[in-house]
């Protein structure tokens, strides 16, 4: 099958999955070189945190950017691509080899490398929305409070133990629920409306449905609908109730709880009285004041489908 990728750059994170991605680079390159026109494919390896941002932003003569790694390298590549003019923005493709792979799951890319390559080769570009929080872009998730603390703690545990996957996220989750069930005061303005005060244990702003390795925090979120889905868990919530909600969120069954508020927005301004744990696409975010806005249909991706099934 002849693809329409044009000149293709593969950006690979050799330390994803605690170094296991390094062995995949040659494998993926071999699979793709045999299917792409000669001299249309090249590979660049990331050498430091943030390097994929620079590579994606500065790549010249490239029509398609593929990334091999986890949600972190997807986040970086998307930020690099969004820094380019819209008419000079390559298509993004994802080959998952990380620990969470929420974005790959949302766009229907298999986690097995050969299947991922075959799927991508059969795909046509589709447009997705991209979120922006302050000066950073995100493709899947933005969250504050407990869920962000869990995501960040999971990264620490992964680096210490070499373990990956949903089980590690759940282990971190129960530890945070038992020992760090904190409440955060916030002021929220949605779509330039009235500012409302509230308290949250967790506050998620989703472009896609997943975080934490497949938890459906906003099960109705869609990558191409021009809006964010918000999930806010309000106190009071005891430890047992919080653990129950955490388990329910694995399959998106938490949304009917009286402690959980679900909203939709195209923009929001959010201020916390003190700095909460915060993350976007699994990467740490700092501060107390956050301007969030949507860029509809801003990025083209190779995807067979969108969103949760």
Image (cartoon, grey):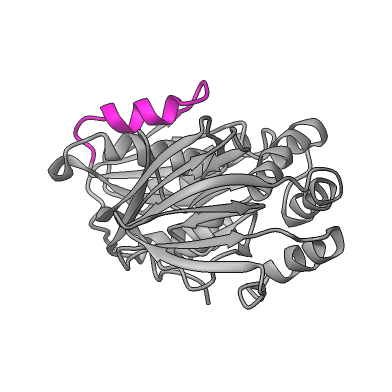
Q: Quadrant of residue 252?
A: bottom right
Residue 300 in sight here: yes
Residue 64 rendering spot, x and y as whole percentages: 28, 46
| Up-down relation of residue 154 to residue 235 (above or below) | above
| Up-down relation of residue 248 to residue 4 (above or below) | below
User: What segment carries the magenta color?
Assistant: 45-62
**On the picture, is 153 further left or further right than 67?**
right
Q: Quadrant of residue 156?
A: top right
Q: Residue at x 43, y 39 (%)?
A: 290
In the picture, the quarter occupied by the N terminus is bottom left
Across the whole image, how many numbered discs are drawn on residues?
A: 0
**Is residue 58 located in the magenta-colored stretch of the structure?**
yes
Q: Residue at x 43, y 58 (%)?
A: 207
Residue 10 in sight here: no
Q: Residue at x 84, y 47 (%)?
A: 175
Q: Nearer the viewer, residue 162 or 236?
A: 236
Q: Nearer the viewer, residue 85 or 2?
A: 85
Residue 113 rendering spot, x and y as whole percentages: 56, 54
**Is residue 252 located in the magenta-colored stretch of the structure?**
no
**On the picture, is 149 further left or further right than 133?**
right
Residue 276 rendering spot, x and y as whole percentages: 61, 37
């Amino acid at each position: 099958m002849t693809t329409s990728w044009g000149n293709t750059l593969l950006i690979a994170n050799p330390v994803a999955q605690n170094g296991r991605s390094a062995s995949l680079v040659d494998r993926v390159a071999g699979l793709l070189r045999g299917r792409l026109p000669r001299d249309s494919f090249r590979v660049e390896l990331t050498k430091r945190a943030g390097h994929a941002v620079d590579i994606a932003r500065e790549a010249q003569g490239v029509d398609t950017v593929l990334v091999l790694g986890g949600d972190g390298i997807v986040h970086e590549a998307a930020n690099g691509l969004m820094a380019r003019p819209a008419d000079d923005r390559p298509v993004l493709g994802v080959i998952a080899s990380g620990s969470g792979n929420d974005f790959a799951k949302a766009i229907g890319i298999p986690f097995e490398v050969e299947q991922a390559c075959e799927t991508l080769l059969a795909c046509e570009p589709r447009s997705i929305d991209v979120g922006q929080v302050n000066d950073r872009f995100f493709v899947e998730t933005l969250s504050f409070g407990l869920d962000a603390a869990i995501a960040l703690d999971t990264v620490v545990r992964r680096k210490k133990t070499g373990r990956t996957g949903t089980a590690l996220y759940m282990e971190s989750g129960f530890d945070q629920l038992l020992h760090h069930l904190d409440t955060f005061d916030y002021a929220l303005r949605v779509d330039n409306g009235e500012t409302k005060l509230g308290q949250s244990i967790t506050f998620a702003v989703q472009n896609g449905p997943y975080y934490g390795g497949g938890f459906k925090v906003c099960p109705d979120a869609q990558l191409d609908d021009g809006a964010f889905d918000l999930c806010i868990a309000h106190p009071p919530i005891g430890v047992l109730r919080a653990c129950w909600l955490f388990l329910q969120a694995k399959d998106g069954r938490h949304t009917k709880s009286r402690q959980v508020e679900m909203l939709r927005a195209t923009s929001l301004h959010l201020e916390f009285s003190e700095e909460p744990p915060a993350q976007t696409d699994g990467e740490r975010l700092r501060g107390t004041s956050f301007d969030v806005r949507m860029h509809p249909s801003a990025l083209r991706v190779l995807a067979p489908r969108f969103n949760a099934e």
